[in-house]
Image (cartoon, rainbow, N blue to C red):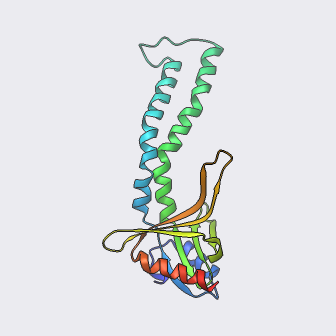
């Protein structure tokens, strides 16, 4: 599939075409934005009561609630300042699904004859590219449904921390139409290197 056929922002297409000059494009994929949004809803569900309580706290400290007697002086200002970071954290958590959607909408996975990369457009026109060479990939985990649509988890590093807990560095590519074929292409690239 050509990157030209993908529905991408023009800046991402232009950057990717310049970045991969001299490389043979084998596969390109845009992550499903809807799936990214839904995946981040867990954070949003946690953020609802968090933000509600933080706003309730601030309203109580400011004396906006009739049933709560507000204190005066520096204690009141201190309590308002104490609650403010909790409100801000709640608002950031509530925006997480929208950021996940935006990132997926402005990203493309590209597999060439030399590497696998993800290109993501930034907020102010900047681009981020993460290149993964075949030697970086330790293992590939595939999950798929009956129609062959699925995801690949690429594991780069697997270690244990000081407590003995397993830690890994990995990326997941979701919504791949023919996931088995893409896995085969990545494994072929790995064997050629």
The part of the image, by quadrant, that contains residue 82 is top right
Q: Position of residue 55 (x, y in %)?
A: 48, 29
Q: Position of residue 124 (x, y in %)?
A: 61, 61
Q: Quadrant of the N terminus?
A: bottom left
Q: Is residue 48 left or right of residue 135?
A: left
Q: Who's the residue at 52% across and 25% down the image?
A: 58
Q: Who's the residue at 40% across and 77% down the image?
A: 178
Q: Position of residue 116 (x, y in %)?
A: 58, 76
The part of the image, by quadrant, that contains residue 111 is bottom right
Q: Nearer the viewer, residue 114 or 107?
A: 114
Residue 3 appearing in the image = no
Q: Position of residue 10 (x, y in %)?
A: 53, 74
Q: Who's the residue at 59% across and 73% down the image?
A: 117
Residue 122 lies, with reference to residue 88, above or below; the image says below
Q: Nearer the viewer, residue 75 or 117?
A: 117
**Which residue occupies the extreme front position in the image?**
164
């Amino acid at each position: 599939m050509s990157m030209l056929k993908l529905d991408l922002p023009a800046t991402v297409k232009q950057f990717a075409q310049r970045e991969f000059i001299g490389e043979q494009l084998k596969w390109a994929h845009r992550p499903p934005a809807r799936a990214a949004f839904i995946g981040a809803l867990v954070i949003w569900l946690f953020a609802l009561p968090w933000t509600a309580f933080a706003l309730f706290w601030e309203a109580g400290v400011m004396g906006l609630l009739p049933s709560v007697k507000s204190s005066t002086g520096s204690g009141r200002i201190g309590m308002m300042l104490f609650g403010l970071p909790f409100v801000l954290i709640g608002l950031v958590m509530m925006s997480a699904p929208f950021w996940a959607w935006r990132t997926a909408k402005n990203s493309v996975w590209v597999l060439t004859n030399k590497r696998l990369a993800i290109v993501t457009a930034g907020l102010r026109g900047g681009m981020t590219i993460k290149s993964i060479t075949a030697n970086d990939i330790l293992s590939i985990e595939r999950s798929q449904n009956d129609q062959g649509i699925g995801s690949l988890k690429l594991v780069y590093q697997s270690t244990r921390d000081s407590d003995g807990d397993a830690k890994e560095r990995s990326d997941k590519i979701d919504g791949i139409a023919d996931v088995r074929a893409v896995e085969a292409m990545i494994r072929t690239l790995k064997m050629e290197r």
